Amino acid sequence: MLDNKLNIGIVCYPSIGGSGIVATQLGDKLASLGHNVHFISYDPPFRLNLKKPGIFFHEVTIKEYSLFPYPDYTLPLSVKMVEVAQKYKLDILHVHYAVPHATAALLAKDIANKEKIQFPHVITTLHGTDITLLARDKNLMPVIKYAVEFSCGVTAVSQALKTETLSVLKINKGITVIPNFYDPDPVCPSRSEIRKKIKIKYTDFLAIHLSNLRPVKRIGDLLKIMAKLKKHPHIKLLILAGGDFKSFKPTVKKLGLQNKIFVRANVLDVENYIQAADVGLYTSGEESFGMGILETMAHGVPVLSTDVGGIPEFMQNGKTGYLFKVADVNGMTKKLLELSNDEKLVIKLGQRAKLRAAEFSGEMIVNKYLDYYFNIVRECHGIKKQQKPK
Ligand code: GMT
């Protein structure tokens, strides 16, 4: 029925964001296993190695027409999907994030069927805000529900997201949970070199936060925690920002935190900074998985985080760090202070965090996706066979 090597289309957002990073790393690993992986997006995903054998990139051109007040992406994306599916005989089209990717894929499938072009099985991976934010908008909910119901296969990055999807969309669709993964890159500069670079002492107690700074990350809570720790000048916070920190600067100034909070924007070698930190600090109001937390743990750094969404599915309270209610600024402040005085506990929690993160290795999770692909292909072939006698 199928060769062991697949032709896989991957559609994702190319910019900094967990879903794009996961999709890129998945494609990279599939290519390492000998599959052909065709990325389709408006820009090459920012961590994608375009020179790697088995990796291809197909750009979607977005044109502006003076008669339209805004450029459309869904339509040229669906046309590109048909083109790539036909030319490269894709077996699977794996779209990351429901809108507009899954919507475009279903439109492309319809066009291909009408044109008698063989179209791949569409698999949609839900990453979070496509459900928790967008599907709660009544202007978008029906289109997301349609995309989820009619995809050949649907996966969610956590059990929490699966549960929420079924409840928000009020559907009965089978959704498979395949968690995110992270393989730690080897670290280069030493802890002391990085600390010198950001101008903090080797003996300072450094908390680290990685995110795109969107409102859901509750950056204001991070600032409040640091303000409460002003009397402890050795406790500092490093923010690796995948978004613009400008809007927070007046608060940092007002609270007098200029010597306590350090920001680095769009850092690529996050691992070098993480290993120079003592603890991770995450205050999200919602998080379907929480890639930054897994990355922090993978480098042996324990985490203080809010207990939301998929986070408790991999971060173990009291073992690999501590979980708190959303907005529990006092609780997080107290624990941060406590840890800053207990090096032994920080090391022990960090070791356990690293071991736990290793359970979410690329090899394990990519194999889950591959099994899922092959099952979908087999199932869909089976369905077709049963339908034939009609
Ligand atoms: O919210 C973000 O940070 C961006 C968003 C994305 O699409 O990249 O993140 C979502 O997907 C990530 C990868 O699966 C998850 O780790 C994040 O938890 C999820 N964000 C939210 O649910 C808020």
Image (spheres, rainbow, N blue to C red):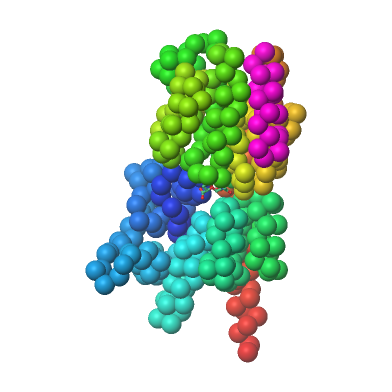
Residue at point 56% right, 53% down?
129
How far across and down, in percent of the image, does residue 4 sit?
53, 57
Asked if the stretch drawn in magenta spans residue 305, the answer is no
Q: Is residue 326 magenta?
A: yes
Q: Is residue 246 above or below residue 384?
A: above
Please state if 196 lies on the left or on the right of 150 as rendered: left
| Camera-nearest residue between 41 and 212 | 212
Is residue 187 visible in the rendered structure shown here? no
Q: Main secondary structure of the magenta part?
A: helix
Q: Is residue 214 left or right of residue 155?
A: left
Q: Residue furthest front?
A: 254
Position of 13 relative to 192 (above/below): below
Give residue 168's position: percent from left, percent from top. Answer: 66, 63
Q: Residue at x 49, y 40 (%)?
A: 213
Numbered-mark total: 0
Q: Is residue 153 visible?
A: yes
Q: Position of residue 177 (x, y in %)?
A: 66, 53
Which residue is drawn at the image coordinates 74% and 33% (left, top)?
317
Residue at 65%, 53% (x, y): give it: 161
Q: Quadrant of the N terminus?
A: bottom right
Identify the image quadrant of the C terminus.
bottom right
* Most distant residue in the bottom direction: 390
* Numbered range of the magenta stretch: 323-341
Nearer to me, 151 or 284? 284
The percent position of residue 170, horizontal first and vertical second, equals: 68, 68
Name the foreground residue: 30 vs 204: 204
